[in-house]
Image (tube, helix red, strand yellow):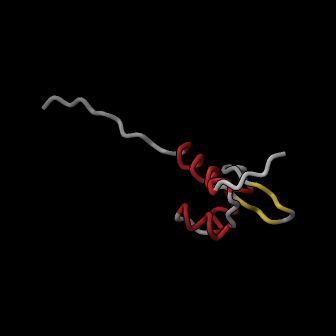
């Protein structure tokens, strides 16, 4: 097991992660319960890495469609 001191692997708590995502903490708890976002359990605490948060954002990003409308 390797412990990396990279800032992207720093563990964020629920408050920090919900703030970064711009959602309520209760919404984040629900996402964790339904396994919709990667997380780390440290005892009974739930933690997230910045990589977890970025992966969730990337996975849920919706790209615009290009409409070819000839008017």
17 lies above or below 67: below
Classify residue 68 by image quadrant.
Answer: top left
Image coordinates of residue 20 in percent, x first then y, are 55, 63
Query: For the view shown, which residue lies furthest in the left direction?
Result: 71
Image coordinates of residue 15 in percent, x first then y, are 64, 70
Query: For the view shown, which residue lies furthest in the right direction?
Result: 43
33 lies above or below 64: below
Image coordinates of residue 54 in percent, x first then y, are 57, 50
Left or right: 22 in relation to 31: left
Q: Quadrant of the C terminus?
A: top left
For the point 52% across and 65% down, which residue is it?
Answer: 22
Image coordinates of residue 8 in percent, x first then y, are 62, 54
For the point 59% across and 48% down, which residue is it?
Answer: 56
Q: Quadrant of the N terminus?
A: top right
> Considering depth in this image, is 69 or 60 the residue closer to the camera?
60
For the point 71% across and 56% down, which residue is it?
Answer: 32
Q: How many marks?
A: 0
29 lies above or below 65: below
């Amino acid at each position: 097991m390797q412990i990396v001191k990279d800032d992207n692997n720093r563990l964020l708590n629920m408050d920090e992660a919900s703030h970064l995502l711009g959602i309520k903490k209760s919404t984040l708890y629900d996402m964790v319960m339904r396994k919709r976002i990667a997380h780390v359990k440290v005892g009974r605490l739930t933690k997230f890495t910045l990589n977890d948060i970025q992966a969730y954002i990337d996975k849920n990003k919706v790209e615009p469609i290009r409409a070819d409308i000839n008017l």
